[in-house]
Image: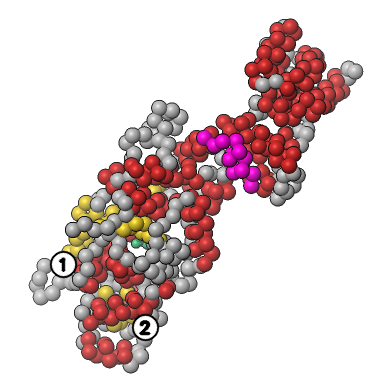
């Protein structure tokens, strides 16, 4: 029977959005898009002590920045709402009652103290047994129902099917789209996990299963760390008499040392990537490759510079190509260098105007226009936009842009005399060359690159020096450094007057250094 494809991202708002989370969301988004299905956002905020509205806001901000939207969700609405678990408690209570009545779940009256005592006892005896000892599992149902109705504090636990009267030990099997058949001996499954807590709140297992069913979820794509939960979920589905969704547990994301990606490896929260100046397109493109091979263009391992196979995909192009068949079983390695490379590529694809808009907040924050937080005036704004072609090829992160453009907004300090001296040359030559440059600086500032190049060549030839040697002292006078963004473009932006002043200032300093007039 044809079933509509519906998948979901179901985060618990207990932390900032991070690489693992957006990878799960992105894969669900791409899968739904690639199959004409629906992508749903559901907030799993059943852990009331750890859930925080600030993290919900962070979720919305992150995904709106990434440009990923859902078809149904708390903000988007939809026919299967509410999409926030804390607004669905009555539903879970109703369904858990059904399970108890069907003898698939039972009331547990054990106090926290008793559970602690069992744990302590086992520890003292070095017992390998963990989890609940199923003390309340065999209370006759009528008695349990009576005690619960009389108000005795209780939880509700799932009855994991166990061996009975010589029948073979039950096994729970399910098929994972990526990993194939998976089976768990029921005796190895968490013994009778809690479904409903004593305060009436559902646990993850109950709420997740009930919602996936009621929301018509056809596919669950989630991280492999959830595999131990899946047999519990399968047992729950069977208990309810429902068909479970198709499961696909996504490959783990590791750092380069083979350990699960964490703060130790570098930035993991999307906020951090954002403040470092990553572009959403680059993050999406790179994260889409974490555990998925797009055969027609992934950048070959170890050759991040390869231009033949660029691996550059827009969100739309990814959605067209995505398929569960392209997932890899092996863990994905998060390579910060590769992500940087993607970012550089996306920066190079931006037009001047767009790049200036994107880079502006970083420039304001860094104090490029006066002091940190200061907005540019219209003159500064003009300079900033005009400077984009100078640095586009020279940065991989937006954050690097302001520091590279300092010299256009404030006079750079004049460096020590040695900085002006071309290789194998001396100070008096540097001064002579700089004087020549002063005479042509006005013309250079008015010429395009080609014209400026011709003028420099002609002047260098007449002076009997290499063009590069002629440009060196000029570059240092104008930018304050031997290595800088392109000189001709800088001269044009600063203009004839300002360029000339900088050369004069440098000359005065050099002349003082030699003691000559
Ligand atoms: N709330 C779970 C999480 O935080 C959802 C796991 C699942 O997709 O089932 O990731």
Of 305 and 325, which appears nearest the observer?
325
Q: Is residue 283 visible?
A: yes
Q: Which residue is mark 1?
A: 170
Earlier-in-chain disc, 2 versus 1? 2
Q: Quadrant of the C terminus?
A: top right
As drawn, 129 above or below 277: below
- Residue 335: percent from left, percent from top: 44, 41
Of 219 and 315, which appears nearest the observer?
315
Q: Kindly report which numbered mark, 2 or 1, lies closer to the viewer in this rendering.
A: 1
Which residue is located at x 42 percent, y 73 percent? 86
The reply, left or right, for residue 156 in relation to residue 187 is right
Quarter for ligand 1?
bottom left
Of 77 and 304, which appears nearest the observer?
77
Is the CB–ligand 1 distance for label 2 below 8 Å? no
As drawn, 401 above or below 175: above
Answer with the quarter of the image where residue 369 lies.
top right
Answer with the quarter of the image where residue 388 lies.
top right
Which residue is located at x 49 percent, y 59 percent? 59
How far apart marks 2 and 1 lie (CA) works out to 29 Å
Answer with the quarter of the image where residue 303 lies.
top left
Which residue is located at x 38 percent, y 41 percent? 317
The reply, left or right, for residue 429 in relation to residue 263 is right
- The image shows a total of numbered marks equal to 2
- 508 within the magenta span: no
Describe the colour scheme in one phrase: secondary structure
Q: Which residue is mark 2?
A: 111
As drawn, 105 above or below 399: below
Which range is magenta? 349-361
Find numbered disc 1 in the image and state the secondary structure of the residue it sits on: loop
Find numbered disc 2 in the image and state the secondary structure of the residue it sits on: loop
Main SS of the magenta segment? helix
């Amino acid at each position: 029977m044809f079933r509509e494809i519906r998948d979901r991202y179901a985060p618990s708002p207990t932390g900032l959005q991070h690489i693992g989370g957006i990878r799960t969301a992105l894969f669900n988004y791409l899968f739904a898009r690639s199959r004409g299905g629906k992508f749903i956002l559901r907030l799993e905020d059943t852990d009331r002590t750890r859930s925080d509205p600030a993290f919900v806001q962070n979720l919305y901000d992150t995904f709106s920045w990434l440009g990923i939207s859902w078809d149904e969700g708390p903000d988007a609405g939809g026919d299967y709402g509410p999409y926030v678990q804390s607004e669905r408690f009555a539903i879970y209570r109703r369904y858990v009652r059904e399970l108890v009545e069907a003898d698939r779940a039972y009331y547990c009256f054990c106090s926290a103290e008793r559970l602690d005592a069992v744990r302590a006892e086992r520890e003292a005896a070095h017992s390998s047994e963990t989890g609940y000892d199923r003390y309340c599992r065999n209370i006759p149902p009528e008695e349990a129902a009576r005690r619960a109705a009389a108000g005795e504090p209780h939880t509700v636990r799932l009855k994991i099917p166990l061996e009975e009267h010589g029948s073979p030990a039950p096994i729970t099997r399910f098929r994972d789209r990526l990993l194939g058949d998976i089976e768990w001996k029921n005796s190895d499954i968490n013994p009778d996990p809690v479904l409903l807590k004593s305060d009436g709140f559902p646990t993850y297992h109950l709420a997740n299963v009930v919602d996936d069913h009621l929301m018509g979820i056809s596919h669950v794509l989630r991280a492999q760390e959830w595999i131990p939960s899946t047999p519990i979920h399968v047992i729950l589905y069977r208990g309810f008499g429902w068909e479970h969704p198709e499961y696909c547990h996504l490959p783990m994301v590791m750092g380069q040392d083979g350990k699960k990606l964490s703060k130790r490896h570098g930035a993991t929260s999307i906020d951090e990537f954002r403040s470092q100046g990553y572009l959403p397109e680059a993050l999406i493109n790179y994260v889409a490759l974490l555990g998925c091979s797009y055969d027609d263009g992934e950048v070959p391992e170890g050759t991040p510079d390869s231009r033949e196979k660029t691996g550059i995909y827009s969100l739309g192009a990814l959605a067209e190509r995505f398929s569960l068949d392209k997932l890899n079983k092996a863990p994905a390695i998060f390579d910060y260098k590769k992500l940087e490379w993607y970012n550089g590529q996306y920066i190079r694809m931006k037009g001047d105007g767009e790049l200036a808009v994107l880079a502006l907040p970083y420039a304001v924050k860094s104090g490029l226009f006066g002091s940190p937080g200061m907005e540019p005036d219209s003159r500064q704004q003009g300079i900033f936009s005009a400077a984009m072609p100078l640095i586009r090829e020279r940065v991989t992160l937006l954050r690097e842009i302001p520091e590279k453009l300092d010299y256009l907004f404030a006079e750079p300090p004049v460096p020590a005399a040695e900085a002006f001296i071309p290789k194998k040359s001396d100070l008096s030559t540097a001064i002579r060359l700089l004087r020549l440059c002063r005479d042509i600086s006005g013309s250079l500032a008015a010429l395009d690159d080609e014209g400026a190049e011709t003028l420099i060549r002609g002047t260098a030839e007449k002076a009997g020096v290499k063009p590069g040697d002629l440009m060196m002292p000029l570059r240092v006078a104008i930018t304050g450094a031997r290595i800088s963004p392109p000189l001709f473009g800088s001269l044009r932006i600063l203009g004839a007057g300002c360029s000339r002043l900088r050369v004069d200032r440098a000359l005065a300093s050099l002349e003082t250094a030699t003691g000559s007039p």
